[in-house]
Amino acid sequence: SGGRTREHRRSVHLILQLAFKVSRSVEVGTMPHYPDEIEYSEKYYDDRYEYRHVILTKAIAKDMYKITSGKRLLEDDEWRGLGVQQSRGWAHYEIHRPEPHILLFRRLLGTDPTTGKAPTK
């Protein structure tokens, strides 16, 4: 049953990603969307995590690429150093290959936003 729940979470998250991508495609055609300032999504949830995505400006995306070459996730101090501002406990957990300037973040539900400490079981 744990595998099924994990699979369900993944499906829900992929549906949310697809919905976001489709809405962006309708807005801006097939060209990548680079905002003038860093954009932050509303949070969305499954039964274990809260998620959000952050869209980088073109200049900041280039700085990110210099750090990672697009091949690895950013550490907390790296994404904060690029100017991404959010409460504690968020982790960059996935690279969205078609649009690597969109950072995907998650943290366990119940994480303390001031300390970043996840809830104990």
Image (tube, grey):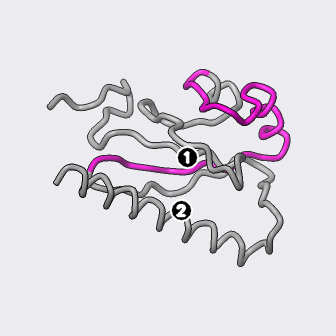
Instruction: Please say if the residues under marks 1 and 2 sit with CB atoms less than 8 Å apart.
Output: yes
Asked if residue 17 is among those painted magenta in the image, a careful observer would answer no
Please identify the quadrant where the N terminus is shown. Answer: bottom left
In the rendered image, the residue lying farthest to the bottom is 26
Which of the 4 image quadrants contains residue 116?
top left
User: In the rendered structure, which amino acid carries the disc numbered 1?
Assistant: Leu
Q: Residue at x 28, y 47 (%)?
A: 48
Q: Which residues are magenta?
A: 48-77
Determine which of the numbered discs, if any, sits on residue 61 in the image. none
- The image quadrant of residue 113 is top left
Front residue (pair 31, 34): 31
Q: Quadrant of the C terminus?
A: top left
Q: Residue 104: which numbered mark, if any?
A: 1
C-alpha gap between disc 1 and disc 2: 9 Å
- Could you say where residue 13 lies in the image, as x and y percent from the top left? 43, 59
Q: Could you say where residue 118 lies in the image, as x and y percent from the top left? A: 29, 30
Query: Which dot marks residue 17?
Result: 2
In the rendered view, tell whether residue 87 sits above or below residue 16: above
Check disc 2 and give the amino acid type: Gln
Question: Callout 2: 10 Å neighbours few (<14), some, many (20+)?
Answer: some
Horizontal relation, residue 37 to residue 90: left or right: right
Position of residue 85 measured from the top left corner of the image (x, y, whole percent): 59, 36
Residue at 61%, 29% in the rendered image: 74
Label 1 vs 2, first from the N-terminus: 2
Asked if residue 81 lies left or right of residue 94, the reply is: right
For this view, does 22 lie left or right of residue 31?
Answer: left
